[in-house]
Every structure is written in C-alpha cells, then in structure tokens.
Amino acid sequence: MANESLFSQTIILITQDGMGSGDTELQHDLLGKYLRLLLEKGALPTALCFYTEGVKLIATGSPFLERLAQLEEKGVRLIVCATCLNYYGLLDQVQVGTIGSMDDILTAQLQAHKVITL
C-alpha cells in the first residue's frame, strides 16, 4: 500500500499532553483525530517517542490508550522516557509502550529518515 511508505523510517515525538499548544481539551481533540487518521490511512510511523508531558498519554486514565495499543499491535514502537515517568510519578501506571531511556529515543532519531514533533 502506498500509504505505508509515507512514514517509513519516520518517528514522531510526542512531548506534550496532547497535540500543539492551547487548552488541554483542544490538544486532546487534535491528537485523537491524528491517531485515528494514522490508523485509518495505514500511514504508520516506525515509532512514537513520548517524553516530558507526553508520557501522560500512555498512563492509566489516558483517553488515547485504545488507539495507541492499536498502533502498537500494528508494529509501531512506542518508546516512553523512564526519567519522565519517574518525574511525573507514572512509572507504575504505564499501559502501553516500552519504557526506555533517552538513549533509546536518540537511537530511534538517529535511525530515522524523518523526525516529526507534534
């Protein structure tokens, strides 16, 4: 499928509790639509990397867990910063993804042909 190659060797950095800046409700709405469209179009990146406030999106209570789990099932790596999880007290609330280090995130960036920050 042509869409599969669009994000081949691309990683997406998620550094906020949603997408863009503004009210949390708007950020969540935008990210929800973005993740839904990734799944619908089959345009799957190699990895999503979560750090700073972005780690809140993979923890208990996140409205994105189902879609993130679907992406993970389709082979998208979800790399979650352990330092950030510790900082926010979320280490025991991780629901999807793989807990990694900044080295894991940097390695993903170095291997990518394209890096996108949401």
Image (cartoon, rainbow, N blue to C red):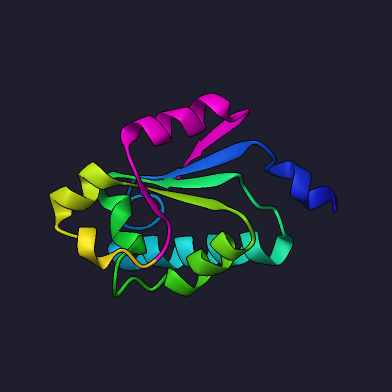
- Which residue is most to the top? 110
Q: Which residues are magenta?
A: 96-118
Q: Residue at x 49, y 64 (%)?
A: 68
Residue 115 lies, with reference to residue 69, above or below; the image says above
Give me the residue at 21% from left, 42% from top: 83
Residue sitting at 84 percent across and 49 percent down?
Answer: 2
Q: Is residue 103 magenta?
A: yes
Image coordinates for residue 26, horizontal then vertical, percent? 37, 64
Q: As displayed, is residue 79 above or below residue 62?
A: above
Q: Is residue 112 left or right of residue 88?
A: right
Query: Considering only vertical position in the picture, is 71 above or below 11?
Result: below
Q: Nearer the viewer, residue 77 or 53?
A: 77
Task: Specify whether 4 is left or right of 61.
Answer: right
Q: Quadrant of residue 42?
A: bottom right
Identity of the residue drawn at 30% across and 54% down = 55
Nearer to the camera, 118 or 60: 60
Residue 100 location, x and y as percent?
35, 43
Q: Quadrant of the C terminus?
A: top left
Q: How many marks?
A: 0
Q: Dividing the picture into quarters, in which one does residue 94 lie?
A: bottom left
Image spot of residue 97 (x, y percent): 43, 57
- Magenta stretch containing residue 12, yes or no? no
